[in-house]
Image (cartoon, grey):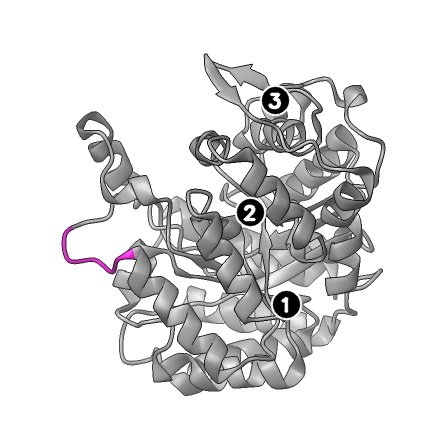
Amino acid sequence: MHTDFSIFRDFPITDSHEHIESREDVRKTIESYRAIFSFFGYDRILLLACHDLLDRPVDPTCSLKCLFVKMALSPKLYAFAGLQHTYDERDTAEEYLRQIRSAWEMGFDGFKMLEGKPGLRVKTGQALCSEIYEPMFAYAEQKQIPITLHATDPAYFWDPPEEEKENMRRLGWLIEPGWPSRHEIFTEIDTVMQRHPRLRLVIAHLMCDYEDVREATRFLESYPNTGYDLTACESEYTIASQAPEAWREFFLRFADRLYFGTDMDNPSPDEESIRHTWGYTSNCLSRTYLESTEDFERHGVRYRSLRLPDDVIRKIYHDNFVTRLNERPRRVDVQAFRDACQKLLENMEEDAAESDYVKLDRINLRYMIDRIS
């Protein structure tokens, strides 16, 4: 795996899959993304809001922080809002429709759904094709709102080595008995797309389908408005390396519908911290896998690189992103943003909870309100 960026091909590169995961002062988060832009030389970054990552307390401020970072780093940073749940009777079709409409009118560039991840799929108790999501998907199709969906998980999450199970359970990754299968979740997505064929849907992590190029192909053949972001974990590249010719053919055939991504979060804004993130490893591993003209090894594992030509690399790194989300991010309705921050702050101040997270959320909301007043 190459770690010298000067070796990689000299194209503009955009990361289509980054998150705010660390709950911290939003000013530090802005500096983190300034550092990420500088360190990797990114042309653009897409922040995907995820309010419930399963292994930590829900962050009700995540979407608003993503939009604030977008405003601070405009015009190079884009932001997708995330769907929020209360896990009670307040979760309704009308509420989810209100959320996506509000986000779009506020100036988000699209919508992120983690609801296809089995742990969250179980927590919500709703299939992706449930009627509760129907008005939201219909609105997204009508307005042509881009959606990035996390769909299912890698196959080994259903049957990992015994020694890994406890840590995977802690992270919300382990698939417990009785949870939906990969096939069930794939079928739910098919149902959504059959109902809404014009939905602009990108499936994150190549639908965690690096072990089955035929299924990945079937999905793109069936639904012309869909695509994949290529964010992958290390084991998935190992699996894909078992069929390099088939995957190279797939990448060449669907070059217009694939997007580079790393799953980078917001580390401390210094080079040493960035080098210790999965986002750094993912960047180097992905680019070596896509670009290299030679096979390579990492930790004793042999990888079969795809040896993709320049025109395909440029599409995956840059051109497809611009086609999907335009040269510049959407304009933010600053007053609507401020009102949303103020409303959330008022709701939180009525809450007697005084955890460190809640205190920090309040500090961030007050800061964001003050900065745009």
The residue beneath circle 2 is 20
Asked if residue 150 lies left or right of residue 198, the reply is left
User: Relative to residue 42, is residue 294 depicted above or below?
Assistant: above
Q: Secondary structure at mark 3?
A: helix
Mark 1 or 2: in front is 1
Asked if disc 2 and disc 3 are in contact, CB closer than 8 Å, the reply is no
Label annotation for residue 110:
1
Q: CA distance from mark 1 to mark 2?
A: 16 Å
Q: CA distance from mark 2 to mark 3?
A: 17 Å
Residue 233 visible, this orientation: yes
The residue beneath circle 3 is 275
Q: Position of residue 267 (x, y in %)?
A: 58, 33
From the viewer's side, name the closer residue of 218 and 17. 218
The structure residue drawn at horizontal position 52% and vertical position 16%, both measured from the top left corner, is: 298
Q: Position of residue 227 (x, y in %)?
A: 60, 60
Q: Is residue 252 magenta?
A: no
Q: CA distance from mark 1 to mark 3?
A: 29 Å
Query: What range is drawn magenta here?
Result: 177-181
Q: Secondary structure at mark 1?
A: strand
User: Relative to residue 252, is residue 162 depicted above or below?
Assistant: above
User: Relative to residue 38, is residue 124 depicted above or below?
Assistant: below
The secondary structure that dominates the magenta segment is loop
The structure residue drawn at horizontal position 27% and vertical position 80%, both measured from the top left corner, is: 89
Label annotation for residue 371:
none
